[in-house]
Image (cartoon, rainbow, N blue to C red):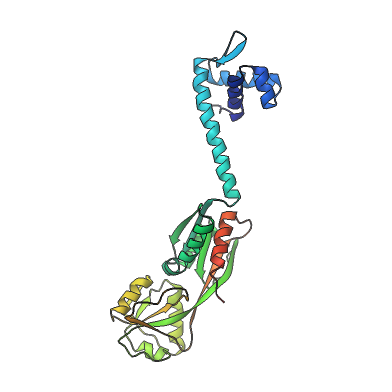
Amino acid sequence: MREISLDRLRTLIAITERGSFADAARALNLAPPTVSLHIAELEDRIGAPLLSRKRGQVRPSAIGEVLVERARRLLADAEQALDDIQRQVQGLEGRVRLGASTGVIAYLLPQALEALRQHHAAIDIHLAVLTSHETLSRLADGTLDVGLVALPQPPVAGLVIKPWRRDPVMAFVPAHWRCPARVTPAWLAAQPLILNDATTRLSRLTTEWFATAGHHPAPRIQLNYNDAIKSLVAAGYGAALLPHEATTPLPDTRVVMCPLRPALWRRLGIAHRAGHVERATQHVLDALWDLRLA
C-alpha cells in the first residue's frame, strides 16, 4: 500500500484554506500543474473525490473534509516532532542513559543531577546500576551514553575512558572499637570484616591491599551495597573498607573512619563513545567533570 506524502496533504490543506488551486500554488511556491498532480495522486490513493468546484470556488468534499482535519493533526505532529528533535540537537532537552555502581549513584551523582536540574532541566537522565564491565559493554553496544567506571580499565575499541577522580579508601570501624591512628592490613585482618563482594573492583583493590602484607582474611559477609555495609558497621558487626567521597556527609556517629597505612585509593573514570557527542550528553559530561578530584 502506497504511503501518503505530507507534501500532498499540505497541498490539500492550502487549497481548502484558499479556495483556489492557483492561490494554493502561489502560497506553496509550486507550479499549478504540480498542485493538480498532488490532488490527483491523493484522490487516486483514497479512491474518491476530495474537492469540488462550486460557484467558482474549490471546496472539500465530505471525505475531503475528514482528510483535511486529519491532515492538519498529522502535520502539526510532524512539526512538533521536528521541533523536539531540534531541541535535542541544540542540547536544550534530550535523554541521556548513564550507568554506574550503587555507591557512585548514591554519593556522587546527586550533585551532578542537581546542577543539571538548575541549568538543563529538560534533560532526562536514565540511571542504570551496573558493574564497570557491564557499563563498558553497554556503552560499546549503544545502549548507554555515559558510564562511570572503576580504573584502571583495558582500552575498548570505540570508547573514550578518561580519569575522573580518586577518593581515599578508609577503614569504617564501629566507634566502640579502639581504632589505631593508621589502620594496617595486619590490624584489620584480625578484626571481623564486612567487605564488598568479589564482582567489584573495590573487592580486588582491598584483596591486593591485604595480600601485599601477606594477609588473606575471610570476611563475615560480602555485600555490594555500601549503605548496608555502613549500617552493619554501626551495629558493631564488623569493620569495612570503603571509599570516602570528600563531599559526602560523615557517617553515623556509631562509625569512625580511620586512614589506612599504606594508603589506598579508589579511582574512577568517565566513559563514553568516541566520535560525535550529542549536546545533551555533553552537558551531562560537563556536570560530572565539575566533580573531578586530582
Q: Is residue 262 visible?
A: yes
Q: In the drawing, does residue 95 fall left or right of residue 20?
A: left
Residue in front for this viewpoint, 281 or 40: 281
In the rendered image, the quadrant that contains the C terminus is bottom right
Q: Position of residue 75 (x, y in %)?
A: 55, 32
Count up the numbered dots: 0
Task: Out of 239 and 212, give the one closest to the viewer.
Answer: 239
Seen in the picture, residue 153 relative to 36 is either above or below; the reply is below
Give the quadrant of residue 86.
Answer: top right
* Coordinates of residue 170 in the picture (x, y in percent): 43, 82
Image height check: is 170 above or below 96?
A: below
Toward the top, the furthest residue is 55
Name, please, the residue furthest toward the front.
Answer: 118
In percent of the image, x 59 and y 55: which residue is there?
279
Q: In the image, what residue occupies the spot 58% across and 30% down?
A: 6
In which quadrant of the rendered view does residue 273 lie?
bottom right
Does any portion of residue 278 appear in the rendered image?
no
User: Measured from the top left, where is residue 214 in percent x and y?
Assistant: 43, 90
The location of residue 242, given as percent across then percent down, is 41, 78
Location of residue 287 by image quarter: bottom right
Q: In the shown orientation, is residue 216 left or right of residue 76?
A: left
Q: At x 39% / y 85%, what residue is drawn?
A: 216
Seen in the picture, residue 122 relative to 162 is either above or below; the reply is above
